[in-house]
Structure formats: structure tokens, C-alpha cells
Image (spheres, rainbow, N blue to C red):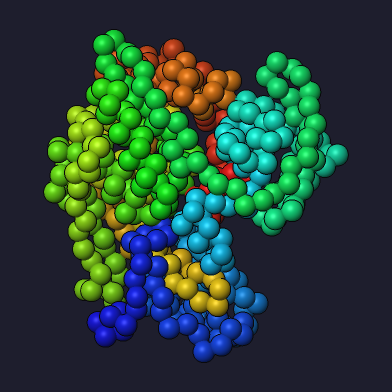
Amino acid sequence: MRRMLSSIGFTLALLCPWTAYAQGPASCTTTSQNLWVRDQLNTYYYWYRHLTPGVNPATQASPEAYLEAVRYRPIDNSYSFIATAAASDAFYSDSQAIKYGFTNQTRTSEVLVLQVWAGSPAADAGLQRGDRITEVNGTSVAAHVTNGTLGAAFGPDVVGQTASIVFVKPSGELFSAQMVKRLTTIPTVAIASVTEVDGRRVGYVFFNNFVQPSFAALNDAFARLKAAGANELVLDLRYNGGGQVDVAVHLASLIGGVRTNGQPMLNYVHNDIIGPVLNKTTRFTNPEHALSLEQLVVITTRSSASASELVINSLRPFMPVTVVGDTTYGKPVGQYGLRFCEKILYPVAFSIRNANNEGDFFSGIPVDCAAADDAARQLGDPAEGSFAEALTVIRTGACTPPSAAQSRALLVRQQPMPRLTGLDALINAR
């Protein structure tokens, strides 16, 4: 095993510490790809002992179909996946994706817009947070939802895909527009600001994804917060589906600074085949612009996953971390990216535990203070439901009393975020 692993080149990328450029299949026929996926799962897969027995790779229509047939259910319904190398590289290396560029919540008769990427086709169409899309391609959203055709109406993630929409502004104004998908840049740090709260300088960072451009964006954001005298932080991860572990280490270290420097941040736990070689502990660092905070408030939703949860779980042994909003996605495991035939296989390969050996939050990290994703207000507005609750925690040290918070929590419970899979779970946008 040591000889096999030493022959693989590792680079930092993709949901995990590295991407492995392993020896690919002998050819790229479907059967060869399926057999190769089988072999990688039998080596790297965290639950390799629980792979569905008796599935013949030669009878499966694609490597994706083979993975679906053998994955360990019910735990791994959505974690392991296969993506194109082009889509993966664009996302992790450049924070780009072929999308319209908006995060949304689907309701029975409308699509509520939650976030719009600056410079995206959705922004060009005039969409903003709080808008309600009521019609797509001449058919009402209500009909699409009933018939299960909404995804098809927005179309696949290919350049040039179009969608004609009708949407309503909060003021009641009605608009129509056409959006055309293109390769669009996702802002990693969309907002970084400072709010004065009872003499405290509260930094606010809205963070979208853990990818390579995030290093520079986070450094710039924390440098500005530090220069502004921020001594508290609200970290908004409400749509952040995760990404690279090394970016999570950097973000957590910017928060903890001197307080956590050199302390164990996370422990990798692999299966018994590769564990003796790859099990390790990663420690916090002390980056230049670290705030060295004593506490942290994090805003989450059901879309906050993977590296987002890692930051919360890893900091908790060293400082109070209060979670505001809704319970997180629930992904306490990570993947390695294994390249083959212009694709990348992402099998769950390890569990991640903090310094206290805590992990296994497959049902998500529970919320401490329930609050709504308040689309009636813009992100970063101190009066927005989740941000307002976060500021209450900083100001009072406690959640809003239950009777006053019921409407916020009710909205969250009635409209849960969808459980996406693959790269869609990380990108969280149409």
C-alpha cells in the first residue's frame, strides 16, 4: 500500500486535501471506467466493507450508474459523486461555474431569489434578493412544481442555455427577462463590513465557497476588518456548501489567530487500508491578518455543508461558537478527487474530527438560536432576520426569547433548503 500511494501525485484541491492523479483505466470504454471506479472504491472508500455486493461493473451504463448502485446507503446518499474535470477545475481553481447565477428557494407557486452573483446573467436580468419568479418559459412555477418540470425548464448547465422568466419585485412590480447561462465567477467573499453594536466593532463576512481564490479574498476581507478595529465577528455561511480543507484551515486560523495557533484543528480518520499511511492531524496557523477572537457567531442554513461545518466543529474546543439560523447540511466526511477519462471521482475517504475527537454530525450541526433567512431584507443588513439574531447574541450573550423568535424559526421550518448533491451542493445556485 505504501508503494502504491507513493506513486500518486497529490495536489491541493477539491473537497479535500488533494486530488490524486492515479493510474487511470487502461481505456475509456464504459466497462473499463466502471472497473476502475470499483477498484478505487475498494481502496479509498471509507465504507468499502459496505459496498453493495454482487453488482457487476460490466452491466452498468456508466461509472456514475455504478457508483449509485454500490454506494453505502443510507449514510452516503449524496456525498460521493463523479463530476467532469472541466467543471471541477473551473469551480475549485477559479470560483467559476456555468450558471445563471442566483441562489433560490422553491415554493409551491414561486421561486424566491435569495442571492444574486454580481456580474452574472441573473444580475443582468435585474434579479435581486427578495424577488419572486412566478413563470419560467411561459409556464407558471406552480405548474412546473406540480409536474416536476422546474429543473428541466431552467435547463442543463451548458453555455447558451436560456430561460425566459417573469418575476415580481417586493414592491409588486412585474418584470420579464431572458437569462442565458455562461461561465460566471462566484464571489467568494461577497460582503465584508463592520457594524457598531453597543461599543463593539462587529465584523460581518458573507462567504460563498472554499476554493483557491478564497485565500486572497479572505486575506483582504480580514485585513479590512482588522484595520477597522473589529473585535467580534459574524461569519455568514448560509449558502456555503464547502470546498477545500486547506481554505477551511486558513479561515479558522484567521478567526482564532494567537488563541488557536499550533493547536490541533482536525484529525483525518481513514479506512483500515489507507489509514496507516494517510491518517494525520492538521493544526491551526496564525495568518498575518488574524483577528484572534474570543468568540464567534455563525449564520447557517440547510445548505451550509462540509468545510463550513468543519470550521464550526474545529473552533468549538477553543472558543464559544454560536450557530444562528437553521441546522446545517450534515457532512462530517471528506473526499479525495481521483481523475480518470476527463472526469473526477469523489469517493468519501475519511471522517474529520476536531481536537476533542468530536464529529459524526450526519444530521447536521444543530442551531443554537433559530432565525429565518429573511429575504425581505438584503444580505448584510443588520435588520435581516439571521444577522439581527446574531447581533442579539453578541449584544446580550443569549438568543432572542422564544416567543419573540417564533416567526423567524417557523419560516425556517416550513421552507427547508433542498439537499443537493455533487458540485451543486457546493455551488448552491441555478
For image coordinates 24% across by 53% down, the residue present is 266
Residue 32 at what x, y percent from top left? 56, 86
Residue 311 at what x, y percent from top left? 31, 43
Residue 217 at what x, y percent from top left? 39, 41
Q: Is residue 307 above or below residue 201?
A: below
Q: With 193 as the anchor, is 181 left or right in this view?
A: right
- Residue 173 visible? The answer is yes
In-front residue for pair 165/107: 165
Q: Is residue 241 above or below residue 367?
A: below
Q: Residue furthest right?
A: 138
Q: Residue furthest bottom?
A: 26
Residue 18 sits in which quadrant?
bottom left
For image coordinates 45% across by 46% down, the residue present is 209
For image coordinates 48% across by 69% down, the residue present is 345
Q: With 153 as the anchor, is 321 left or right in this view?
A: left
- Residue 399 visible? The answer is no
For image coordinates 67% across by 27% down, the residue present is 131
For the C terminus, the quadrant is top right
Q: Residue furthest top?
A: 198
Residue 12 at what x, y percent from top left? 35, 62
In-front residue for pair 374/248: 248
